[in-house]
Amino acid sequence: MYNASMSQISPDQIKLFRESTPNVMALRLQEQEVCGYWGVIFSPKGIASLTKQDMTGFLSFAQNKRWREISKENVTADMERLRSALLVLVDQSRPVAERLNELEPGRGALAVAHLGKAKLAPVLLVTHPRRYGVWNDYSERALRGMGLFPEFAPGWHLGEQYAAVNDVLVGLAAEYRVTLWWLDVILERIARLVR
């Protein structure tokens, strides 16, 4: 169920931005490079030896090539806790909602200070680029502007909320024939149009 009351931008704006992407090949190569590299770093084996430098590297735009504003707070104060949290995050044997509820800032059993949806969702994307989209302030503003942001049931935690948002993202990527990475780029552009 969507809240269409705020809708001011047509979802077809996704198609317009897709068609006006200046260099699709460069975008696809960037996606493959970033997901290929960080997908290994954030694999269970990679997480076991994850360093502070690895994590701060991922959080910097210079290395993730996509998210400028996720490096503000340090999440590496307790590396053992961070590794445990990331292992839960990438554990595909469990539903994503269950995993994210364990990591929810301020309430999850394995929560890490400053490790919220804007940092967790990009890790999900680079490890499973066909399965998980990015929910952050930009994508939320864009989805709300198009009237596509899902309504949350009372009592939902981060996990259920992300699962609902991700269903919308995956659906849009399929409908408009873009990758979830490309959709994230487009939604950031759309967010800038939302008043």
Image (cartoon, rainbow, N blue to C red):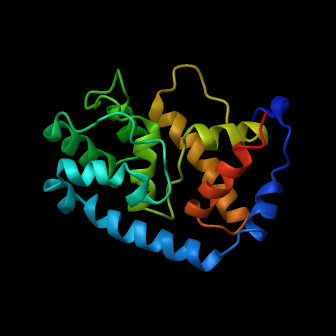
Residue at 55% x, 74% y: name it: 28
In depth, the one of 1 and 112 nearer the eye is: 112
* Left/right of residue 147 with respect to residue 45 in the rendered view: right
Of residues 188 and 130, the one nearer the viewer is: 188
**Residue 149 appears in the rendering:** no
Q: Quadrant of the C terminus?
A: top right
Residue furthest to the front: 62
Q: In this picture, is 187 found above or below 25? A: above
Callout count: 0
The image shows residue 50 at horizontal and vertical percentages of 18, 54
Q: Is residue 31 above or below residue 161?
A: below
**Compared with residue 171, is residue 39 higher up or lower down, i.e. above or below?**
below
Q: Is residue 186 left or right of residue 10?
A: left
Q: Position of residue 31 (x, y in %)?
A: 49, 69
Residue 123 x %, y %: 39, 52
Quadrant location of the N terminus? Answer: top right
Q: Position of residue 53 (x, y in %)?
A: 21, 52
Seen in the picture, residue 73 relative to 55 is either above or below; the reply is above
Residue located 35% across and 33% down the image? 73
Task: Please report the residue visible at 20 percent of the width from the left and 55 percent of the height from the top.
Answer: 47
